[in-house]
Image (cartoon, rainbow, N blue to C red):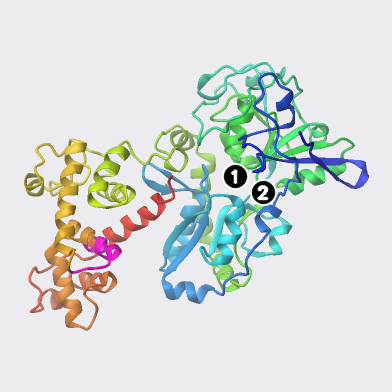
Amino acid sequence: MRRPIPTPLPGGAALLVVLAAAACEPRMPLAYLRAAAAPGGGGALAQGVDAEGPAGIMEDLPRPVDLDWDSIVARDTLSAVLTFNSTGYFIHRGEPMGFEYEMLEAFAEDHDLALRTVVARSRADLFRMLNRGEGDVVAARLTLVPEYESVVALTRPLYSTAPVVVQRTTGGEGAAGEPTGPDTAVDVEEVVGADTAIVDAPGDPIQVPPPLEIQARLLRRPSELGGDTVHVTSASDYYTRITELSDSLGQDIELVEVAQADQVEPLIEAVAEGRIRLTVSPQNLAELSQTRFTNIVVTPVVGPEQPVVWAVRENALGLQRQLDTWLVDPERRQLRQQLYIKYFVDQKGYQERTEDPYMASETGQISPYDSLLSREAAGLGWDWRLLAAQVAQESRFDPRARSWAGARGLLQLMPRTAREMGVSNPTNPEENVQGGVRYLQWLSGLWQDEISDEEERRKFILASYNAGRGHVLDAQRLAAKHGDDPTRWEDVAYWLLQKSKPAVYRDEVVQHGYVRGIEPVQYVSKILKRYESYRSVQ
């Protein structure tokens, strides 16, 4: 087994760094030096290499595309590169949520822009996707570190939080009420309080070798980290801080960068379960995690509060100015405070989403009906996640949902449509979805020859499902009359919106009269936006 490479530091100390789970050896989801010596250990440690820290995000960056605020406004869309985590961006019961997501959504709405989300599968991809133009802004719990300022432009802070050590105590319970082992001598109630709640873990657990018998002291001061091992996320923003701390101590700090852990939540879980001893986390997230694990201690703080920021391309200074101006606006500062409370202070809300099996960004499950939707969407030729997005829009996955007009079930079938599609019990999920899909197939057949482009045709199908095909045909005729393209959804949507005006719905080419056109137009838009979010779910 190759040993980690010591990085010499001034003053005689060394920060021992190793990258776990390197590709050159059999992949081991979480490895550390003592694992090989442990009884029943999970195999050898991957080849020791220098941990990268923030440099892992910045290497091999392409030149930034020339795309700034004016171009974003011209295309009517702001694209954001995000990562899935339990506070910044996630999908819960079919709804995209999160502090950074809702902030960006509000910014886009205030500037009459649509928000498009793109999920980076690893932190190393964040700035590459940004510079390639796949996104315009990175919103991924980025800490303001000097290294980033050399390659991207950073916004004003969204909030600040300190880096803190997360460690395990004894005398309490871990996740879901599981007893914990005796690895320290401090009572859990003394440290975290007697009435701390316990909830399930968000996200898939990181597999590690069987837990070691770590007989260790509870750290109370940063100086006590000397001689210890700290596990951090890949490309960790705290790498520099731990390096500086190691420099100031007379003992080595062994730093293990976990290759596939892009978020700190799985490492906090590993600490609580006794599989690793220490990690470093943003303090606000670590304290929130105490609602889930009664046996973790959030101490000591190992540095000053650090701003959390967004990043834009270094040549997108117009976008940077727009974001900065918006962030300091008094009304938006109030929104920021409200969202911070919602996602970082509200322990009940955190508990509800982290213990919910339909936290899709973590579990891969959008709804209780994923299997049904996947099976039925195949016959329609649709990605099942598009059908799921339509169900979310219609009923929020509630099979008992009923509208004021009498539409019922997951796909909100009207009584006449349900009868025509052979649905006897519209509150039965399987019957309702099968009937709704048959209706969608019928609509698809009607549009097959008129709209050749498959992606465009789906927009016409969805609009027809919502408002009726007759109103969409009226909008097509209006588009043709006024020189627009009747096969292009954007043009037809414009005339659907106009059909609420008497001068338009009384036009001689209109056969179906008034329609509140904003409803089908927003219906299509919201489904497609939700579908974009669902496509990130594996």
Residue 291 to residue 105: above or below: above
| Quadrant of the image occupied by residue 294 | top right
Residue at 54% of width from left, 23% of height from top?
195
Q: Secondary structure at mark 1?
A: loop
- Out of 328 and 126, give the one closest to the viewer: 126
- Out of 183 and 462, give the one closest to the viewer: 462
Labelled pair 1, 2 in contact (Cβ < 8 Å) = yes
Q: Residues within 10 Å of mark 2 (few under 14, many from 20)?
A: many
Q: Which mark is residue 235?
A: 2
Residue tagged by mark 1?
A: 262
Counting from the top left corner in percent of width and height, residue 140 is at 57, 52
Q: Residues within 10 Å of mark 1 (few under 14, many from 20)?
A: many
Stretch of the chain drawn in magenta: 450-460
Counting from the top left corner in percent of width and height, residue 43 is at 67, 28
Residue at 58% of width from left, 37% of height from top?
265
Q: 533 left or right of 322?
A: left
Residue at 46% of width from left, 65% of height from top?
78
Kindly tell me whether residue 446 is visible in this rendering.
yes
Kindly tell me whether residue 501 is visible in this rendering.
no
Residue 489 to residue 482: above or below: above
Residue 372 to residue 129: above or below: above
Residue 453 inside the magenta-drawn segment: yes
Q: Secondary structure at mark 2?
A: loop
**Three-letter residue code for mark 2:** Ala
Q: Earlier in the sequence, mark 1 or mark 2?
A: 2
Residue at 87% of width from left, 35% of height from top?
251
Residue 151 to residue 208: above or below: below
Q: 421 left or right of 10?
A: left
**Three-letter residue code for mark 1:** Asp
